[in-house]
């Protein structure tokens, strides 16, 4: 699995961890402050794409902001999955500000033990 492209003109790029364990890949994207309905996960032509938009919070009349470090706006992250995954079984969950996408490996991509028979 590899990063396909990075969009330098987008508003921000969420950090992503990619792990491999127990016959599947796990992609975790840090999306704190986002709502589930403001993100999209899709697969097309072997490319998994995470897309969404973190919207700026309404300003309050409580005072003037002295520093703003949190980023807002649209993002897109794409990853080439190749043929070694089972795209029909990909699942996604969102909890505590982290989007987790589980990508099972295809049976053909999993290691197999070959029995050695006596000749």
Image (cartoon, rainbow, N blue to C red):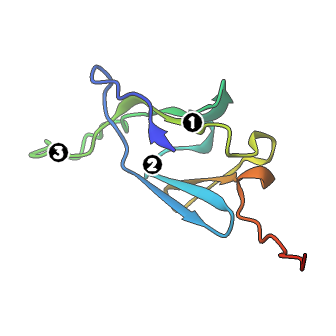
Q: Gap between marks 2 and 3, in whole Å?
A: 27 Å
Which mark lies nearer to you, 2 or 3?
2
Where residue 72 sits, quadrant-wise, is top left
**In the rendering, which numbered label is found on residue 39?**
1
Between 39 and 88, the residue placed more toward the observer is 88
* Number of the label disc, if any, that sits on residue 63: 3
The span from disc 1 to disc 2 (Cα, nearest Å) is 9 Å
Residue 102 lies, in percent from the top left, at: 65, 54
Give residue 14's quadrant in the image.
top left
Instruction: Compare marks 1 and 3 and give the one earlier in the sequence.
Output: 1
Q: Is residue 44 above or below residue 65?
A: above
The disc, 2 or 3, on the residue closer to the chain's N-terminal end is 2
Which is nearer the eye, 65 or 95?
Answer: 95
- Give me the residue at 66% from left, 25% from top: 44
Left or right: residue 16 compared with residue 67: right
Where disc 1 sits, the SS reads strand
Asked if the residue under mark 2 is in contact with the one under mark 1, i.e. CB atoms within 8 Å, the reply is yes
């Amino acid at each position: 699995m590899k990063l396909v492209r990075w969009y330098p003109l987008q508003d921000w790029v969420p950090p992503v961890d990619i792990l491999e364990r127990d016959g599947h890949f796990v992609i975790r994207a840090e999306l704190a402050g986002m709502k589930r309905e403001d993100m999209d996960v899709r697969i097309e032509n072997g490319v998994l794409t995470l897309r969404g938009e973190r919207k700026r919070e309404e300003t309050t009349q409580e005072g003037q902001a002295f520093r703003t470090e949190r980023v807002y706006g649209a993002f897109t992250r794409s990853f080439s999955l190749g043929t070694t995954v089972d795209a029909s079984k990909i699942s996604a969950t969102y909890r505590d500000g982290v989007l987790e996408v589980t990508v099972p490996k295809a049976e053909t991509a999993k290691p197999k033990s070959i029995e050695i028979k006596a000749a």
